[in-house]
Image (cartoon, rainbow, N blue to C red):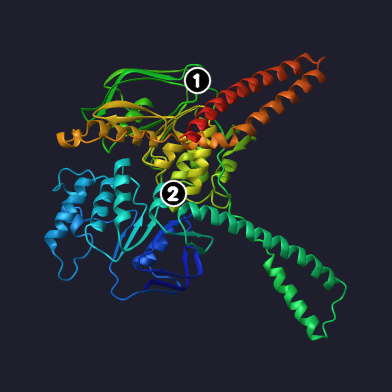
Amino acid sequence: MACAYTFSDVTIFYSEKELMNHVNLTISDGDRIGVVGRNGAGKSTFLRLLARTESPDNGEVIVRRGLSVAYLPQTPELRNEDTITQAALSYLPAQPGEDLSGAAYEAQTILTQLGFTDLNQPVKELSGGQRMRVALAGALCRESDVLLLDEPTNHIDLEMSQWLEDRLMRYRGTLVVVTHDRYLLDRAFNRIFHVGGGKVDTYQTTYSGYLEERAQREEMEAATLRKNKSLYRKELAWIRRGAQARSTKAKGRIQAFEALSDAIAVKPQEESLTMKSVASRLGRKIISWENLSCGIGGQTLVEDFSYTLLRDDRLGIIGGNGTGKTTLLRTLCGEITPISGVIDVGETVKIGYFSQHCPQLPPDTRIIDAVRDVAVNVYTPDGNLSASQMAETFLFPSQMQYQKVESLSGGEMRRLHLLRILMAAPNVLLLDEPTNDLDIETLNVLEDYLESFQGAVIAVSHDRYFLDRICGHLFAIENGRMVPYISGYQAYLDARAAERERLAPEKSTAREAAPQRTKTPGKIKFTFREQRDFDTIDHTIADLEAKLETLQSEIDRHASDYAKVSELMAQQEQTQQKLDEAMERWMFLQEKWEQIQNQ
């Protein structure tokens, strides 16, 4: 297969940070590559090198002659005076002998599929997300040998994400996409590139295979390091006994020892993001709303919505762009007055609103000052943490905390925005597209945090994996009404598919007369959360039973200390309640597992 790109000893810096250090790799025609890595690791820079909009500081990126490239950056540039059709059509230069009418028709078709109704709307009237979709139409409307996309699923809704996935699955050229959409990564790509630490590690597999292979590589590297350290200790003892440097054999052994000392030099570990639980106490009454209608600009978007939020609710809200998801969240947190209805908020409720767009901070504000403006310290299970310590857990090390916020990348700004919200110790979180601009590692940490968060969560998201993992039930905004769906996003898809089948036109009389096959019911399967609980529930129950035995022993031992016994008995009651809940969960999961096995 012909080679599209060759990286030869490529090194590139961003400011003083080395993004790539002597990178060598090849990309062949027809490769389908998903690019992953931390925010700021160099993923976008990697795409710019492929698009030839940036050059390496050292080394060379060799591009096959005559290669046509379509490139979509995170912030595409469009001319304000163009209509959206003109902007899409002129996004890429026309190719010699191209049928312009065919390209214009394809551009208009894609724009319509991406939710635009007025194809002559001026670009100057568009939001940032709409500009992104126009540029996406421009990148897709012409045939190209290579398609480069940088976070294309940002600012598009769930249906458009599914449409884009289907479109990319049909693309026959060389595809390189930076994305945090884990379902897209697993379904659309056969190679994964991990950018980070000055390297580009390549994996000839899907995203699931990449996760397994990367874990294996890390285990092998750790085993090799242990082996080298053991050998180093033996050679060090020989050196200290007094090596005879006169013989050739001894000289070679000394040189090998010096090489071994370099091999065991442990690289500083990448700092890992941690989110501390900082929720404040939440009383019995949370939030409820009755017959709520909300909208903006005189237009009603959501009508007659009633709901009582529970302490441990994980509520997902989905719907197309412009249907009112953000407006609903802003209404619930008090930024917008409802058109009608009543919102009743408990006295102990502290709402944290993680908005889709980071609030503007003065560009010369220092990172640490942006955190201290919210709180100087917070209480966590690890004790009181200062603003500086919390910033470090969010990957803002002490030497970075005095930088100005204008120096931060988009992902770093989102991380800072999230940190500022958690510093206020909210007990109800309203999250508006929390996955935008966050890398996969940060998403995993955020999801783990939300699962253990001691409060309620309402999340608007287009990230299918996030919805499946976090949300216990969904509301979809359909024609201004909030339609409930139990469980995660996959359950929503299954319900929609069943509804479409029910409403499908009746078959012809002739076909109806033919022998009908018995319809096979859809397979029962675990959701993401059920599968995880099923895998861990036995250990959880065993741990709780062991804790109860320990507490009973402690109660017996401190029988004469009334205060201590009261404290232990309170812990015993809480543990027993958790054990009862775990046993109920175990029975439910066991019954479902038996149904799955009997299919």
* Residue for point 44% across, 32% down: 471
Q: Nearer the viewer, residue 68 or 74?
A: 68
Question: In screen coordinates, is 437 left or right of 111?
Answer: right
Going by the numbered disc 1, the residue's amino acid type is Thr
The image position of residue 68, as x and y in percent, is 28, 68
Mark 2 secondary-structure assignment: helix
Q: What's the residue type where badge 2 is placed?
A: Gly
Residue at the disc numbered 2: 411
Q: Quadrant of residue 512?
A: top left
Q: Position of residue 370 (x, y in %)?
A: 48, 41
The one nearer the camera, 146 or 188, is 188
- Identify which residue is drawn at 59% across, 26% down: 582
Q: Are marks 1 and 2 in contact (CB under 8 Å)?
A: no
Q: Earlier in the sequence, mark 1 or mark 2?
A: 1
The quadrant holding residue 35 is bottom left
Residue appearing at x 33%, y 41% in the figure: 158
Q: Nearer the viewer, residue 385 or 597?
A: 597
Q: Badge 1 is on which residue?
A: 348
Is residue 460 in sight in this rendering? no
Tell me: 143 left or right of 368: left
Residue 351 location, x and y as percent? 45, 27
User: Which corner quadrant holds the N terminus?
Assistant: bottom left
Q: Say which of 82 and 583 sits in front.
A: 583
| In this view, 329 is above or below 462 | above
Query: Where 401 sits versus 225, above or below?
Result: above
Q: Residues within 10 Å of mark 1 (few under 14, many from 20)?
A: some
From the image, which quarter does the C terminus lie in?
Answer: top left
